[in-house]
Amino acid sequence: MTERADLTPDTVVHLLRHGEVHNPEGILYGRRPGFHLSELGLAMAEQVGEWLQDRDITHLVSSPLERAQETAAPLARLKGLTPTIDDRVIESENWFEGKRFGVGDNALKHPSSWAKLYNPFKPSWGEPYKVIGDRMFAAIHDARDAARGHEALIVSHQLPVWVARLKAEGRSYLHDPRSRQCTLCSLTTLHFAGDRLVQISYAEPVGEMIPAKDKKAAFSTGGASEENRAR
């Protein structure tokens, strides 16, 4: 796209997915407290913080969950920022929260779970996609306003980030979780000219640190190179 002067991005909002979580039992932890970054996840957070430290980030926001705050911590330290905790960027609600999805004891194998899977559009197993998209964009707009002329960063979770991207691109919310372009510690970046969203870009600053099995899993798919989409 050839940009006119009035469409040159002047404010940027990054959506950062948190790093790897210590979860040896394969539980869908959702909004449950007590789930922290693994050693690898902490290393990811340090690397993405270093990757971003020279960016003009003046406003930092985090989901209230531990894994998000721990991911934000290195960048906060490097930039001298105090993260704003925002409930609007928290993980999505899910009926399967607390259930196991490991090998041999997958909650989806139990007939009692099937009744929750009848409507993929809502979705019937959790918080409606529209609600997720609306709350994420309310937080994005506030972050954009707080960082006018600079950059803001929001640390959130895979589904909220992906739904925000689908909303930004005007795409259907119905999707295969395995197709989400949102790996651990990936950045989905929204470029604004004034209040208008003019570009979306994507990057994986810690892509080489992500185990192959995680890239193929529904909760951590990706492996794509940086992508730009003009609005």
Image (cartoon, rainbow, N blue to C red):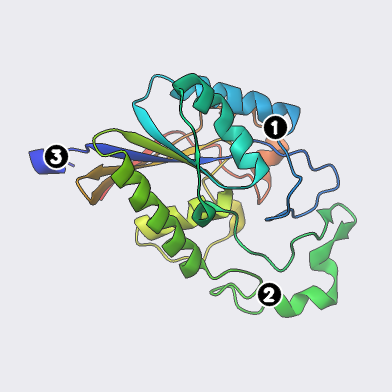
Look at label 1 and name its amino acid. Pro
Q: Which amino acid does label 2 sit on?
A: Leu
Looking at the picture, does residue 49 appear above or below residue 143? above
The N terminus lies in quadrant: top left
- The residue where tag 1 is placed is 211
> Residue at position x 73%, y 50% from top?
33
**Residue placed under numbered mark 3 in the picture:** 2
Dot 2 falls on a residue whose secondary structure is: helix
Q: Where is residue 154 in the image (x, y as percent from the top left)?
A: 46, 42
Separation (CA) of disc 2 from disc 1: 29 Å
Numbered badge on residue 108: none
Other-residue count near label 3 (Cα within 10 Å), few / some / many at <14 / 14–19 / ≥20: few
In the displayed structure image, the side of residue 90 where residue 150 appears, left or right? left
* Mark nearer the N terminus (2 vs 1): 2
Crowding at mark 1 (Cα within 10 Å: few <14, some 14-19, many 20+): few
Q: Where is residue 116 in the image (x, y as percent from the top left)?
A: 71, 76
Which of the 4 image quarters holds residue 117? bottom right
Residue 117 badge: 2
Name the N-terminal-most of marks 2 and 3.
3
